[in-house]
Image: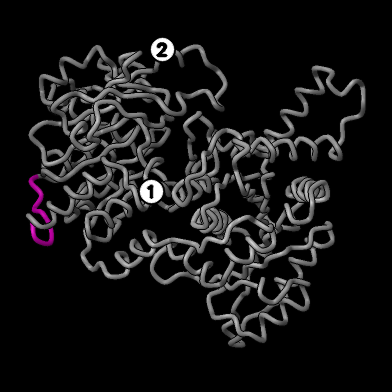
Amino acid sequence: MTKHIFITGGVVSSLGKGLTTAAIGMILEGRGLKVSVQKLDPYINVDPGTMSPFQHGEVYVTDDGAETDLDLGHYERFTHAVLTKNSNFTTGKIYQSVIKKERRGDYLGRTVQVIPHITDAIKEAIHAGVPSKDVDVALTEIGGTVGDIESLPFLEAIRQFALERPPEDVLFVHITLLPYLKSSGEMKTKPTQQSVGKLREIGIQPHVLVCRTEEPMTEEMARKISLFCNVRRESVIEERDVEFSIYEVPVDLIQARLDSIIVENLKLPTNVETNLDDWRGLLEKIRTTETECEIAVVGKYIELHDAYKSIYEALDHAGFANGFKVKLRKIRAEDLRSEGTKLLEGVNGILIPGGFGERGLEGKISATRYARENGIPFFGICLGMQCAVIEVARNLAGLDKAHTLEHSSDSPHPVIHLMEDQKSLKDMGGTMRLGAYECDLREGSRARALYGADRVSERHRHRFEFNNAYREQLEAVGLAASGVHPELDLVEIVELKDHPFFIGVQYHPEFQSSPLSPHPIFRGFARAALENSQDNGSSPSPKSDVLIPQETRS
């Protein structure tokens, strides 16, 4: 029977529960065990799809088209777990399922209550998160912080879940904070004690405490936490801030013997020592690499790092694979309107990510033109690909007012238009083109060379697409449609001939990149950026300073 680990958090949010959960999954896989990973989120939105990135960070998309929490990105980058729509449940999704049952009369006239109906639905969601019977350990992260009203039904549900299983089938891991007070020069254990106290009031006694800290945890402090929190001393784990990379976390947890503690508590049938040799090799490469290459990311939500979390991670993966560290230059697309493309001078590559809304669009288009005219490697993702199409249409094909119908309904040249199956939709949530779709790659194209395949599958999240009415006209000026969805003839990839590297993709390749297996296009883009750096010394000399036309600044 599948064993279950529940990961909770206390004291403050943003402690890194998702990262720790992913790291636990990895070290268990290193023992030869098969894992599944899931997150339960306490917010009332059915999913994060309609939430602003400033509120929630990026929306991570699974193969089956679920819009999910960004922590699922950590899960996939660290483990081989198969993630689906059942890998992320919210309060909204749980209540929606219960209310649908009530409307159908499934409860036979009974009063519907939080206990048992909501908690039963949560337990059903936990079981649904285990995709197959051969999963040895199912990890479930509980979002939010112990003490939050929103988290109470989830905590009650996992308390009940543990009661219904043999003691050796369930393990509770609680992540907490040891704050360091500079004024007194010491760390404090009281917040941890109170957090565990709250958890115990609910009826959950954690088996393992993972203590986040900036400074080393002394033996005396560990014993004090053990005594007051009723957790065995060896199960009080220090998780200090990493020095080089978040990818150090699994190795640090192994050094703290967390893998052995989990195996012993859950009585798992494995005597295999945890093997992370390939991961340790990656960490050595990260520590010893000194070469840097600067890549600009021109985005709408640039102020929040988590808004483009998977993109930054994919750039790092590609950089490691090419023997350098990526130096990010984060540029607000709107700033290009007032300051011009001098903000891009000296970069060795330009990446334009996706986004929604008109704000910053013209800045992204001007950055695209700058990359094209100055021979700087360019990579456009989703809206970034559409910006490339608009820019080439305007400035190479002579379609002066080319635009996307998303923001200019009266454009005489709608080179980007609404997908046919989106025209009749009214609800915003979960209605875009979502999930994995196949793409055929043109023979002789750069895309096909990078992938080393003639057909690939990539994940999507968009409503608007390349307008095929302009395909021939844009091909004539050098913008080739090098990747096409075979069934609907939708353009998925465009690339510019006679340029060091100029590719736009309609999908989100960042969701299929991992530290040990960088995505092929990211890897090629990073290699081109490094070559650009080597060819131009410290910085390329711009051929033009592209300013947005005055009429578009209103």
**Residue 38 locus on image (x, y percent):** 60, 44
Residue 347 at least partly seen: yes
Residue on which the image places disc 2: 420
Q: Which quarter of the image is occupied by the N terminus?
A: top right
Magenta highlight range: 536-543
Q: Earlier in the sequence, mark 1 or mark 2?
A: 2
Quarter of the image where the C terminus is located = top left
Query: Considering depth in this image, is 437 or 185 the residue closer to the camera?
Result: 437
Tell me where residue 459 sits by quadrant: top left
Furthest residue in direction right, as rendered? 110
Indicate whether residue 449 is drawn in magenta: no
Q: Is residue 308 left or right of residue 120?
A: left
Residue 380 placement, left or right of 394: right
* Three-letter residue code for mark 1: Ser
Nearest to viewer (mark 1 / mark 2): 1
Q: Quadrant of residue 457?
A: top left
Q: Identify whether 393 is placed above or below 242.
A: above
Which secondary structure is most common in the magenta stretch? Answer: loop
- Residue 510 rendering spot, x and y as whole percentages: 37, 42
> Which residue is depicted at the point 53% across and 38% down?
83
Q: Can see residue 152?
A: no
The answer for how far apart the CA atoms under marks 1 and 2 are is 33 Å
Residue occupied by mark 1: 514
445 with respect to 211 (left or right): left
Quadrant of res 282: bottom left
Q: Nearer the viewer, residue 237 or 414?
A: 237
Residue at position x 35%, y 52% in the image: 516
Assess disc 1: are there few (<14), some (14-19) or many (≥20) residues with their C-alpha within 10 Å of its C-alpha: many
Q: Pinpoint residue 2: horizontal percent, then vertical percent.
A: 67, 45
Quick one: label 2, few (<14), some, or many (20+) residues within 10 Å? few
